[in-house]
Image (tube, rainbow, N blue to C red):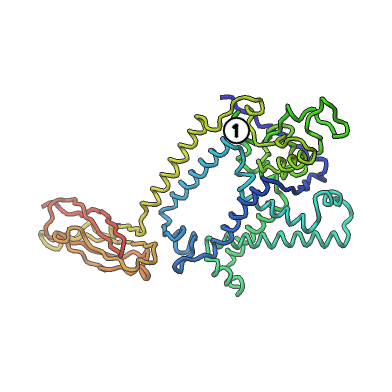
């Protein structure tokens, strides 16, 4: 299948100074849609960390207790592969979206883009609009400009610190984290982690910005493999727009593009969409809104820049659902089903059984054989505090050791047990331990060794 090549073309626009892009904010349908997508995601990120259910965090990855809490359900570190599976399923969803609509995830929901737009908004409020910032760039800094710039960086840093605290709150309970910070009892490790996270947020969203999308993000590098002629992506209609001409110089041969360059000025990565598909484009659709606003003022049809496939621009049939997209969709659904099945079949009780150091068995009489074991029981649900230990065949075997394990006191502790039998039938036999809680049950098999009779 023929692939659309991604053009590696990046030239700073004329309103950039020293390679810095001053993004002009615009309004329109897609910018409103982007906000309707990003603001709920921001609310979830900053809000979920504070929500508790039945005295427990709603979402927590606890290193101290070696457990995960996902929306009220408890999982152990042994279930971490399920998170890997969830990431793989999410990647399948990303591929599905890329084949259908290009890098729409990057433009509307990627954290890098969301935080960048927030930092751009702060910059626009404190230092003025893009045109003013561009004119002042490189000029001597007066007292007013210095005050505005310091205010901008302080707000950036405050938001970066708030972001770092919130992110860390998903690993350390946020109330404990804030309390430790206020009382100056925070450990050096946590303090260093917060400083790194805040610094990365400040640099990525405030200073580096589009360079992350252009140079660091791997998605931009393999989007050419994902795209085909039917992929809907932000596109410029060359047949309609060319040749470009200013409005007062236009004639009957001129295209609809008036060469106002607004599509470039609003682009957060500083590209000119009129040059064609480029690896840096994140499909944020800011150029679509800017162009549509110009077309409406000129009483021309909107859509000179729009989400369209190469086939649509060539006036050819372009089905959205096609075998390639259906294949990605099938893989995505299968991946999510596998992950859901894995989450449904997790166990709140993890048991490990080992043989105690020493002889493999102890013979107390002619037919009285004993084996020694050490057992570790880990519970990951606070509703389960007591676990009863027993054997499957208590008539043949006799169990010595704690009949009940208090998980609050002995969670993940190795406890000694001895199993004896006076009816040994073979040199090696299967021994089954039962571990019963209030609502959970786990059976664990091991071997019982003895001399043959």
Name the residue located 67 percent from the left edge and 45 percent from the top edge.
30
Where is residue 222 shown, x and y percent of the image? Answer: 60, 35
SS at badge 1: loop
Q: Is residue 301 above or below residue 53?
A: above
Residue matched to label 1: 231
State the image coordinates of residue 443 (x, y, percent, origin top left): 27, 56
- Look at 60% across and 75% down and name the residue there: 183
Name the one closer to the observer, 54 or 91: 54
Closer-to-camera residue (35/295): 295
The residue sitting at 75% across, 44% down in the picture is 266
Give the tally of numbered discs. Answer: 1
Taking the view exactly as shown, the residue that stands out farthest to the bottom is 183
- Left or right of 92: which side holds 445? left
Quadrant assignment for the N terminus? top right
Res 360 quadrant in image:
bottom left
| Residue 324 spot, x, y in % from top left | 51, 31
Closer-to-camera residue (34/409): 34
């Amino acid at each position: 299948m023929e692939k659309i090549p991604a053009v590696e073309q990046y030239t700073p626009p004329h309103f950039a100074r020293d390679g810095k892009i001053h993004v002009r904010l615009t309004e329109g349908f897609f910018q409103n849609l982007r906000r309707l997508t990003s603001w709920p995601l921001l609310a979830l990120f900053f809000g979920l960390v504070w929500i508790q259910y039945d005295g427990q965090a709603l979402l927590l990855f606890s290193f101290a207790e070696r457990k995960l809490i996902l929306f009220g359900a408890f999982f152990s570190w042994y279930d971490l592969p399920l998170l890997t599976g969830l990431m793989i399923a999410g990647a399948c969803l990303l591929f599905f979206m890329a084949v259908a609509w290009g890098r729409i995830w990057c433009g509307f929901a990627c954290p890098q883009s969301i935080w960048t737009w927030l930092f751009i908004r702060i910059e626009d409020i404190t230092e003025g609009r893009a045109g003013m910032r561009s004119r002042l760039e490189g000029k001597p800094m007066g007292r007013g400009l210095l005050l505005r710039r310091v205010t901008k960086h302080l707000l950036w840093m405050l938001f970066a610190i708030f972001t770092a605290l919130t992110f860390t709150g998903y690993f350390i309970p946020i109330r404990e984290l804030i309390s430790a910070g206020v009382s100056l009892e925070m450990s050096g490790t946590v303090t260093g982690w917060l400083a790194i996270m805040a610094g990365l947020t400040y640099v990525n969203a405030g200073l580096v910005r589009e360079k992350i999308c252009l140079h660091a993000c791997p998605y931009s590098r393999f989007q050419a493999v994902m795209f085909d002629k039917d992929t809907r992506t932000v596109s410029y209609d060359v047949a309609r727009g060319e040749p470009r001409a200013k409005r007062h110089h236009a004639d009957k041969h001129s295209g609809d593009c008036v060469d106002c360059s607004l599509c470039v000025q609003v682009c957060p990565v500083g590209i000119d969409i009129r040059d064609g598909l480029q690896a840096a484009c994140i499909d944020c659709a800011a150029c679509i809104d800017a162009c549509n606003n110009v077309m409406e003022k000129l009483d021309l049809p909107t859509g000179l820049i729009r989400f369209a496939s190469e086939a649509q621009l060539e006036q050819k049939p372009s089905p959205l659902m096609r075998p390639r997209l259906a294949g990605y969709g099938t893989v995505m659904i299968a991946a999510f089903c596998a992950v859901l099945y894995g989450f449904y079949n997790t166990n709140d009780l993890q048991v490990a059984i080992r043989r105690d150091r020493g002889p493999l068995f102890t013979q107390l009489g002619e037919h009285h054989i004993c084996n020694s074991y050490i057992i570790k029981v880990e519970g990951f649900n606070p509703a389960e505090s007591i676990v009863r230990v027993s054997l499957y065949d208590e008539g043949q075997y006799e169990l010595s050791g704690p009949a009940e394990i208090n998980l609050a006191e002995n969670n993940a502790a190795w406890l000694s047990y001895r199993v004896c039998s006076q009816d040994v039938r073979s040199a090696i036999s299967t021994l089954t331990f039962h571990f019963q809680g209030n609502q959970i049950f786990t059976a664990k098999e091991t071997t019982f060794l003895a001399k043959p009779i």
